[in-house]
């Protein structure tokens, strides 16, 4: 068992707190933009585009993460409306969907390919998710169910969001490992996978499958539909929609390539 006694609060200024969670989220955004800049250079996308979409994505991600968290915990917030503008709670799927919507709007305004930009940010996005989960680990949020196995963790700091002194599954570590493996996978296939948009959709499918499985070990889940928490319902929906879209993109790509091959063959004759 691993004891975690690290204070989630890094330091305070009067009533203002700086938490490790916020520091790790900031680092996650920096890494996301950094990796995306590398990919943008390879894909001949202007660097300014990544900085712009970084700003749009951060705003959309934060708003989406907060809104989905409020929806998920509506019974609490309806009784504590003064907490609505407190950004202490964020939902990971809200961040993903909010960022994606912001990116879609940006692409429509700038008349750019959403799929190309999605492929560009996908590797950085999943690494950012891994780094963000480090913040969850320190914060004690997204904690696991009670676990008596040697892999369990015990939170001792009174500022932690996890139950104190109780061994729980290290679900944050599960998320970190899954996302790091996902980053390596996406990074290795990014130059080979086709058509445009496939890498982005593979990221969504991969992330959703892992998130769905890991949440069975979570101790903070609230049933939403079919006795599943909100995030798992979204996981299922995203896998289905992304898989269908991936098949459609592949079929369209093959149909587009075939006429070209026929023309080239006729020329050679």
Image (spheres, rainbow, N blue to C red):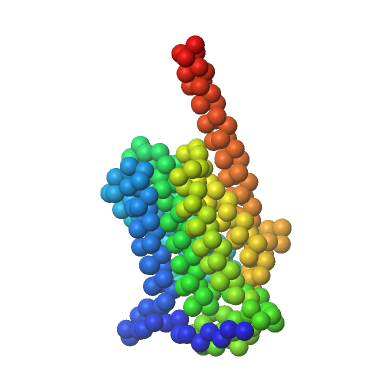
Give x and y (percent) for residue 168.
63, 79
Closest to the observer, 47 or 264: 264
Give x and y (percent) for residue 128.
44, 62
Establish if 62 lies above or below 191. Answer: below
Q: Which residue: 53% across, 67% down?
A: 176
Closest to the observer, 232 or 81: 232
Establish if 189 lies above or below 16. Answer: above
Q: Is residue 111 visible?
A: yes
Quarter location, residue 25: bottom left
Would residue 27 appear left or right of 222 to someone viewing this image? left
Quarter location, residue 233: bottom right
Q: Is residue 49 visible?
A: no
The furthest residue to the top: 269
Closest to the observer, 228 or 184: 184
The furthest residue to the front: 269
Give x and y (percent) for residue 211.
60, 61
Q: Which residue: 34% across, 53% down?
A: 37
Would residue 203 appear left or right of 109 to someone viewing this image? right
Q: Which residue: 62% across, 56% down?
A: 209
Give x and y (percent) for residue 240.
63, 46
Q: Which residue: 50% across, 37% down?
A: 195
Q: How many marks?
A: 0
Closest to the observer, 20 or 122: 122
Establish if 102 lies above or below 253. Answer: below
Point out the image quarter for the N terminus. Answer: bottom right
């Amino acid at each position: 068992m691993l004891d975690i006694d690290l204070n989630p609060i890094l330091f305070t200024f009067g009533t203002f707190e700086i938490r490790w969670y916020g520091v790790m989220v900031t680092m996650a955004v920096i890494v996301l933009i950094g990796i995306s800049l590398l990919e943008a250079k390879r894909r001949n996308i202007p660097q300014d585009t990544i900085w712009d979409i970084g700003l749009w994505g951060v705003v959309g991600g934060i708003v989406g993460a907060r809104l989905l968290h409020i929806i998920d915990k509506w019974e609490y917030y309806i009784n504590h409306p003064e907490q609505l503008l407190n950004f202490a709670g964020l939902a990971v799927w809200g961040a993903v969907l909010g960022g994606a919507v912001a990116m879609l709007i940006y692409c429509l305004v700038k008349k750019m390919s959403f799929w190309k930009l999605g492929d560009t940010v996908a590797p950085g996005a999943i690494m950012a998710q891994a780094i963000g989960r480090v913040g969850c680990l320190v914060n004690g949020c997204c904690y696991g169910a009670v676990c008596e196995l040697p892999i369990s963790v015990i939170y001792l700091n009174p500022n932690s969001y996890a139950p104190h002194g109780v061994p729980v599954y290290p679900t944050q570590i599960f998320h970190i490992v899954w996302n790091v493996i996902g980053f390596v996978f996406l990074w290795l296939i990014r130059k080979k996978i086709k058509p445009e948009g496939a890498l982005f959709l593979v990221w969504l499918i991969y992330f959703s499958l892992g998130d769905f499985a890991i949440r069975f070990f979570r101790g903070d889940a609230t049933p939403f539909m079919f006795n599943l928490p909100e995030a798992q319902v979204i996981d299922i929906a995203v896998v289905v929609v992304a898989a269908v879209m991936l098949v459609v993109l592949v079929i369209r790509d093959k149909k587009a390539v075939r006429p070209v091959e026929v023309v080239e063959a006729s020329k050679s004759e």
